[in-house]
Amino acid sequence: MARGSTRPTSRDVAQAAGVSQAAVSLVLGDKWRGRVSETTAERVREAARDLGYRPNLAARNLRLGRTRTVLLVVPALTTEFFAGVYTGAARVAADHGFGVVLYPSPEGIGPARDPFASAQAALDGVIASSMAADALTAIRGDQLPLVMLDSDPEGSLGAATVNLDITDGVRQVAEHLLDLGHRRFLHLAADVPSWTFEVRARELAARVGAVPGTSVRTVRAPISIDDALAAASAALSAPGPRPTALVCDDDKLAAGAYKAARRLGLRVPDDLSVTGLDDLALATALDPELTTVRLDAELFGEHGMRALLAVLEGRTPEAGDIPVELVVRGSTAPPSAS
Amino acid sequence: MARGSTRPTSRDVAQAAGVSQAAVSLVLGDKWRGRVSETTAERVREAARDLGYRPNLAARNLRLGRTRTVLLVVPALTTEFFAGVYTGAARVAADHGFGVVLYPSPEGIGPARDPFASAQAALDGVIASSMAADALTAIRGDQLPLVMLDSDPEGSLGAATVNLDITDGVRQVAEHLLDLGHRRFLHLAADVPSWTFEVRARELAARVGAVPGTSVRTVRAPISIDDALAAASAALSAPGPRPTALVCDDDKLAAGAYKAARRLGLRVPDDLSVTGLDDLALATALDPELTTVRLDAELFGEHGMRALLAVLEGRTPEAGDIPVELVVRGSTAPPSAS
DNA sequence: GAGCGGACGTTATACGTAAAACTTCCGGCG
DNA sequence: CGCCGGAAGTTTTACGTATAACGTCCGCTC
């Protein structure tokens, strides 16, 4: 009596179909072959449909001791890059019956709040971008299976890592600009403490430094158009010979650099070649379109999820970085004479 | 014996502290006053700390019949707008002990897959953007408390709605352009079946139509720079007098319009004024910077979450649209003579 | 000296599911 | 005839938590 408004349970379905709760679980869990007759199974399925039955996930998770849910920890979602990572991860996850919960470290909520307090769901594992640095300590506290994205393979003790081949991307940028004849470089670096940015600086210095008569100056800025504008302005109007090539750690920084160049009366690419890294929508919205390194965010997410699945199943994730590709557009050209 | 590697439970803590499981639950749940002595309570807390105890959320959710987790359903996260919505919603949620799980309908996963299959977490409620139209039917199937964002207050039977005052934003755009002297308008509309875009078209037609001697032509494009470029190109090179003002439903469309104008040799704003809507980072990356309507995404998310909390507590969400603001930048100017 | 109420706990139970272990019925085989 | 094995279920249990309901013990009051 008075079943009222509460959600139907497997027991309600059992009663409606005239069987035991166990039978319902067997049928709906597709484990009934040889245990329940076809006619009874159909009766159960019908009752479930009629009642609009949906299994209680909390109960199932408790019973099974796993949730088929993983957490993706990313920095604040201010570009479409991590949206792509999510999409790729979610696609692979769905193929394996997993769900992905997103935890974008929300600025302003306070760094002390750890991801697990927020993503209340019980979790089977975690994929974390190294850029979400503040959240990491909290994560390591738990013993959850962990995959790190874009993180130092040496430094992330034990955790599997999946990386984009940023080193190769920077190499391609450097060689492209060197081939064009550039010798004086300015590196507009992201002021974010993350391994992936250290790699950029290191590789650029190495490649350019290998050629005699070159120089690289570095200036740092937080990843925002306005900050990049300010930093690039200052650097470009500094005394001494002006750099002819500006290598940015990120497309957003490049957008700021465009504005700085414009204010200083420098034309891109005639007076200054500019490169980015990411290939966001922004890159083709700029005028001229930005020469940049395309990162396949979805593929990145897919690999991350596959690695986590491997860890969960006790396998070893396959190694190997994800290739990236230089996309040459209108923002790079040979340096003007002089 | 052999407690091994499995996560400690409240029973383990109880054993370590020499009390019953119930006592542990009382202490850790902060309900022990008058039930457990201070010294015993401290002993329990210490044991919990030593063992690294974390309550099993699946069990708690099952016991309590609620999860303090809500789902935020958004269209694919290709701009920072919904990142802002998430941030606002998550902030308010955190203040009330809730978590927010994000479900960006991932393109390519297939529309049939409903959010609940993916976000395996059990949920207390849902906040859904009307732009994620394909997911909505699945949602209505469940009887979860629902708040709709940017949705027709008439059409969304029963569900509470929280809206940005888009109508007012479009009004401001229209009056700004009319004040500048524009009479021939082109409306670059988002080709997305959503109420929020219908509103834009309706209000623009009404405001401009109220002034004699005006005209509005409309052309639609999916929200992508390339599609906008194509649509705007075609419309701007059509026969007849060229429009002097191009009103875009979205900043991304405006970015496409800039490229179209450039290819046709039209200068912004001298030959063509352009407006957007959103105020993404993109808006200030463009040259000239885009006159657009600033939507406060975080505030939007906050209001959405507050409305859902109200519904969950049986209160009536407060009504009232969220104000928006026209930001005049360099992309609008009086039409050139002739 | 009976009784009462607070302090300090414990025992028992329920949440909804999955699955192991058990029952019952029957047809067939040696 | 005795027995075995498979089909078709059912009964029971466990997952980890929160909390209602129940015990003590002790100091006080009347």
Image (cartoon, coloured by chain):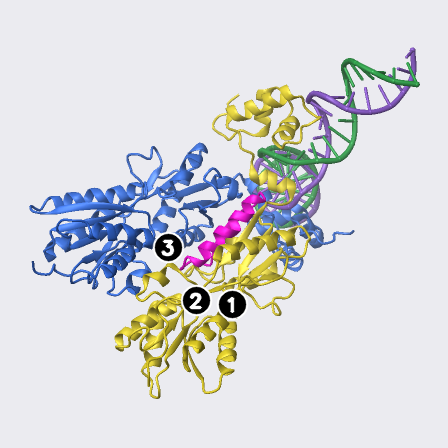
Chain colours: A yellow, B blue, C green, D purple
Q: Tell me, yes or no, whether dots 1 and 3 are on the same chain.
A: no
Q: Is residue A87 magenta?
A: yes
Residue nearest the viewer, comparing B114 with B24 = B114
Query: What are the residue bounds of the magenta stretch?
Result: A77-105
Within-10-Å neighbours for mark 1: few <14, some 14–19, many 20+: many
Whether residue A119 is visible to the viewer of this picture, yes or no, is: no
Foreground disc of the pair 1, 3: 1
The reply to whether callout 2 and callout 1 are in contact (CB within 8 Å) is yes
Per the image, the residue denoted by label 1 is: A166
SS category of the residue bearing label 1:
helix
User: What kind of element bears circle 3?
Assistant: loop
Q: Earlier in the sequence, mark 2 or mark 1?
A: 1
For badge 1, the amino acid type reads Ile
Q: Amino acid at mark 2?
A: Leu
- Can you identify the residue that label 2 sits on? A277
Query: Does any portion of residue B205 appear in the rendered image?
Result: yes
Q: Identify whether B284 is placed above or below A179.
A: above
Question: Do marks 2 and 3 share a chain?
Answer: no
The type of residue carrying mark 3 is Thr
